[in-house]
Image: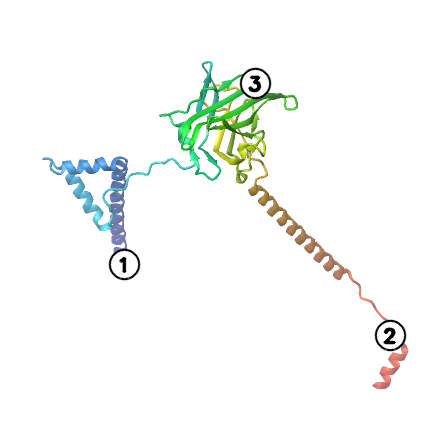
Amino acid sequence: MASTRRPMSLALFSFVFLQISSSYEQLSAFVEGSSDDAPSQDIRFQQNEVDADGSVFAAEVRLRRALQPYAWPLHAPPRRKLLQSPGMLLYSPLSVSYNGKTCILFRARKLAIRYRNHSLVDLTERTFSPDAPVDTKGSFCSKDKAILNLRFGDVEDLRGLAIRLQMSNTFYESAGQNWFTLDNVYIHYNWTHEAVFNATDVYAPSTNSYHCQHVSSLQKYDTLLVPSANTDHAASWHITFTDFQIQAFNVQSSKFAAASDCATFFTPAILMGLITSLILLLVLAYALHMVVHLKHIDRYEEHKTTVYFPRSTEAESTEKNNL
């Protein structure tokens, strides 16, 4: 009797498993076919509910009945699409042509300036928006010099606002190649006022582009833009380029060459890792020293010989008298 029940139970279990797996395969096939265009599928179902043949409606009813015991929804949510993350660049690089040839490529995820205690002015869209590109009249390119001139006009309370980046290309014998340097950043405002920042720490091989996460006059961003003098108007300004990249020499196409990044080897995270590793090495060295010292003590104890002290005859006679 037990031998007959066992095959029957196995057959019943196999039948139930096959039914569930077939239902799941049908469900997954339906979801894959409908998730790409879920709204259109809903509209199609609604439209075909009143059709004469009713084939789509009948399929929907059968699917509802199949899903009812599992409490699964009929329509799966549409597949998630990759959205543009905040760290991605929203605009294409700004290209500047001189004598009919592209000679400067420039982009930044954000360009913001602030004058004294005034509100922050975001110039990103004014610079890179394809609908209203910034006026680059006055830009210049040559073999040794390049100027990127961004003319914004009147922005809020500022009149005739313009930002100019001046770069130079120099050959260094020690390196055996040309390097370009961002010499100065100028802010022109109110037609006659000018703020000048030195940016000599921004440099790269002339065959490469230069990239840095922040090129700014703020101390929290390493102050790559330094006011040229204490008496200059630059002390009243704050300017920050976020995700800054520029190439002003040897531009071969509308794409940047390989970037030379400003990130140094000894970043705070790397320094903390080196310090932690050094501490662990010191602890390990001390532990090994203690283990070797303990083994040395054990060896000394093993090889230590017993010392025999001969007993005198007076002590033996005294013991005998006591007995």
Task: From the image, tell me which residue sits under label 1.
Answer: 2
Q: Looking at the picture, does residue 4 appear above or below residue 253?
A: below
Name the amino acid, label 3.
Asp
Name, please, the residue furthest toward the right: 313
Name the amino acid, label 2.
Arg
Q: Looking at the picture, does residue 235 appear above or below residue 285?
A: above
Residue 34 x, y percent position in the rendering: 25, 37
Residue 162 x, y percent position in the rendering: 46, 26
Q: Which residue appears at 47% of the width and 26% of the height?
A: 191
Depth check, mark 1 against mark 2: the one in front is: 2
Residue 289 x, y percent position in the rendering: 69, 53
Determine contact: label 2, label 3, CB under 8 Å.
no
Q: Around disc 1, counting alpha carbons within 10 Å, would you say few (fewer than 14), some (14 to 19), or many (20 or more)?
A: few
Q: Earlier in the sequence, mark 3 or mark 1?
A: 1
Q: Earlier in the sequence, mark 2 or mark 3?
A: 3
Residue 297, quarter of picture: bottom right
Name the amino acid, label 1.
Ala
Spatial CA distance of label 2 from label 3 is 104 Å
Depth check, mark 3 against mark 1: the one in front is: 3
Whether residue 91 is visible here, answered yes or no, is no
Pick the residue in front: 11 or 175: 175
Spatial CA distance of label 3 from label 1 is 96 Å
Q: Please indicate whether residue 178 sits to the left or right of residue 3 in the image.
A: right
Task: From the image, tell me which residue sits under label 2.
Answer: 311
Task: From the image, tell me which residue sits under label 3.
Answer: 144
